Amino acid sequence: MSPHFDKATLVDAVLELIRKTSTQLPRDVIAAMEKGIANEEEGSPAKSVLSFMLKNAIEAETNSTPICQDTGTNIYFITIPVGVSMRMVEDAIIEATKLATKKTYLRPNSVDPVTGVNTGDNTGIMAPFIHFEEGDRPELKIDLALKGGGCENVSDQYKLPDTRLKAGRNLEGVYKCIVDAIHNAQGLGCAPGVVGIGIGGDRASGMIQAKKQLFRKLTDINPNPELAELESKLYTDLNTLGIGPMGFGGNTTVLSVKIGTVHRLPASFFVSISYMCWADRRHSMVMDEKGVRYD
């Protein structure tokens, strides 16, 4: 194992990643919020709520305090180079998570579903959630998202065909599912949201793909022309639903829509929707022989 991937260095690096993710909104999210404020009517509840959200985010970054009282589920997507121990990386993340909780970058959020006991340090069975993939480059890349309970509660999954929605096994059917999910969410997911979508797969892989979409920059364009067109149409149409920030009405119901696909069985066609609140907390770090870099 290369010396620049030692556990102690990694613990410190991940601790800083957690701090940044909990306290700093990405620049593209800030820009989307500013665009939303500009699109709302002067004196409207929507403009006022969005302005307070942005003020809160700026204060959180300035004071290095959590953006939201619910610091959420810790979701890691990791690209690991050949020869680096996954167990070592996972151990370092768990140690950093415990330290971050002590430093109050994270609220204790990990509860045993049987006993109701909170572990007090954000660790437990599959907590944090860590997904590994092996990469071709001699670097360790760690993406982290903090996903609050409110937005997770309004995430959803559909099975096509859906007779209630008159939705078939095609992109038009996918469109109907997503509109239905965002309409049902109303303000409960702390709108405006970022919508990650996984088309296909099984119930687990489709939702993983949906969550992966939340790490894309809000301004990027899907390389698949059909999906790019669908993302654009959904962004426009969802913002005409009138739900608006926190459900107070307005023109800003979503900040972005991102879609990925997974090959499926002929018998199954799932549409998985991972809804992220306005506090779209996600950051990345890369560790290699030159040291650690954050996005």
Image (tube, rainbow, N blue to C red):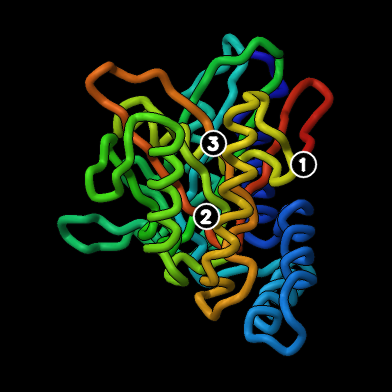
Q: Secondary structure at mark 3?
A: strand
Residue at 44% across / 53% down in the picture? 179
> Could you classify mark 2 by the number of other residues whose Cα lies within 10 Å: few (under 14), some (14-19), or many (20 or more)?
many
What's the amino acid at mark 3? Ile
Q: Position of residue 263 (x, y in %)?
A: 40, 18
Residue position for label 1: 295
**How far apart are labels 3 and 1 at the CA level?**
22 Å
Among the 4 quarters of the image, the one containing residue 62: bottom right
In the image as oriented, which residue stretches furthest toward the front?
166
CB under 8 Å between callouts 2 and 1? no
- Rendering coords of residue 74 (x, y %): 49, 49
Q: Amino acid at mark 2?
A: Met
- Element at badge 2? strand
Name the residue carrying label 3.
Answer: 259
User: Toward the viewer: 228 or 291?
Assistant: 228
Residue 246 screen position, x and y as percent: 53, 75
Decide which of tag 3 and tag 1 comes sooner along the chain: 3
Q: 73 or 272, which is in the foreground?
A: 272
